[in-house]
Image (cartoon, coloured by chain):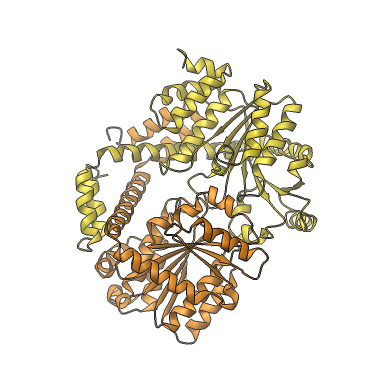
Chain colours: A orange, B yellow
Amino acid sequence: MGPNPTALILRGDFRAAAATLTMIETQDPKARPILKRLYPHTGHAHIVGVTGAPGVGKSTLISGMTGELRKRKKTVGILSVDPSSPFTGGAILGDRVRMLQHSGDKGVFIRSMATHGGSGGVCGAVRDAVHLLDAMRRDVIFIETIGVGQDELDVSILAHTVVVVLNPSSGDAIQWMKAGLFEIADILVVNKTDLPGAEGMFQGLQGLFEDSAVAVFKTLAKDSDGISSLIDGLDKHRTAVLSDDSHAARQLHLCREQLLSLVREKIRSRLEKRMDPAVIDSLTERVAARTLDPYTAADQILKQAGLHEL
Amino acid sequence: MGPNPTALILRGDFRAAAATLTMIETQDPKARPILKRLYPHTGHAHIVGVTGAPGVGKSTLISGMTGELRKRKKTVGILSVDPSSPFTGGAILGDRVRMLQHSGDKGVFIRSMATHGGSGGVCGAVRDAVHLLDAMRRDVIFIETIGVGQDELDVSILAHTVVVVLNPSSGDAIQWMKAGLFEIADILVVNKTDLPGAEGMFQGLQGLFEDSAVAVFKTLAKDSDGISSLIDGLDKHRTAVLSDDSHAARQLHLCREQLLSLVREKIRSRLEKRMDPAVIDSLTERVAARTLDPYTAADQILKQAGLHEL
């Protein structure tokens, strides 16, 4: 990396951005000073979460939206936290976006982030990556994720707009609703309108959300059908959110939640450095043998780490 | 609740168990001494995680397995962490099991647990609930969960045997595989064999896992087809796990992970009590205004809480 990664990233240098993202992912402390200097330059991007079950076509949809945004001269950043795409198998998004990139388009920056390993770190890494892309002056940043119960990555505390993607074939709108997925949705997309049941599902959802702030769209992402309207819908939501009196309150809420998650991460990593593995091993053995209960053992670990008076 | 909930629970009293589970769910500190006294009586149950997307028929499958286990004179406990069932809408399991319960069968205890509210608390509450049901001498405890990326509830650190349920209709075995769901599976079940593609999917999975320790089953849970073989498969896995040299190591690993998650919960709740809301509000406002970066703000919160030297 060059002598001043912050300046390079602010200028939109892909290589410096990629190197810093790797540091973020591997929890390299050298990322921290860069992020601190980038932070004042954030706050411009429209951050859009795109969530839904595997196979609903999130990647194809993001690819289509990216093409449309490029036509509109907008720059795009994509963070794919869905492990099924784009580089570990979801070839469609990877290929299409790489095509754009290889054709010399510096308007699209894409990065996949690992969800495995490092429990608790996913949300923090994605949050930091969003800050970085925001400072790179991406107009729109997509965060792609399998959204079901993925509490570690609560996309609704990172994104201004949450898009939930559904398929008519799954026929499980009611199930997803029960699962709480609709609670975080600002925009619902029925993708794969070439499948039977699409129109019925679309109209059903429209009826259901008629009197709400939730907008419902239908797309056939692979043919780019409906994409332009969806982008209009994203813009409209962004505008509504910005003009809304409650916007400032919501922004503060997001900031607060992100700040608290950062505090928790810090405590956690420091704690792990303080704990004596030998003590933990010996307590674990006693708990496994049922000669000690885990609640008392946890108190003993805190004591050993000097945290019992906390 | 009676004068000695611990003794009542050990005797299998449903009312005392339910009251204590409510305390666990609401994070009432009065649950802790009860759990401490119950813990030495745990370690007998076969703990089985049942996971899969909404609508694959997890509830119906658990209902079927419960019926079969009752025929075999086994007692059953069910913890449903899937918000879509059983009491919030998944009527099938609720109704069937309530039928058993209402017919005077004290061999089945069922409880649904909320996944919303109280970030970080889900896994802890489920772990405590498993200990309680184990102390109640349930032979088999099912933990029902939507398993996708639900990091907060990592069922693989709670269960001896993880059953992943799939549908042929979803046609997305490959997608789930990419999503890492198969990594935690000990047993795969292709449910709804009356749907087209079931036999193909079953044979495909059998081929895929031929040389592995993963067993593949097919069921039509609503007609109880294949349930008896599946229960045999669960027993076989339990026996294999117990006779395996690596069993003790795995048990220790589970104990250790559970212990560490308990330590983290404790730190978290104590930290939250220590933080000054006014300080957090003022720092949040500065972060939102981009006059302060969140990393420096997090350090200031730690300092205010007296944890900067941690």
Does the rendering let one see residue A193?
A: yes
Task: From the viewer's side, name the closer residue of A185 and B192.
Answer: A185
Task: From the viewer's side, name the closer residue of A262 and B8.
Answer: B8
Does the rendering let one see residue A53?
A: no
Above-or-below relation of B137 to B155? above
Left or right of A162? Residue B133 is right
Quarter of the image containing the C terminus of chain B? top left
Left or right of A127? Residue A38 is left
Percent x, y of residue B204: 76, 58
Above-or-below relation of A98 to A212? below
Residue A45 sits in which quadrant? bottom left
Task: From the viewer's side, name the closer residue of A33 and A259.
Answer: A259
Percent x, y of residue A8: 31, 78
In the orientation shown, which residue stands out farthest toward the bottom? Answer: A103
Residue A254 sits in which quadrant? bottom left
Above-or-below relation of A172 to B223? below
Above-or-below relation of B56 to B274? below
Please tell me which residue is depicted at 41% across the width and 56% down the height of the picture: A156
Left or right of B138? Residue A262 is left
Please tell me which residue is depicted at 72% across the width and 27% down the height of the picture: B70
Task: From the viewer's side, name the closer residue of A240 and B205.
Answer: A240
Q: How many marks?
A: 0
Percent x, y of residue A165: 54, 63
Percent x, y of residue B302: 24, 47
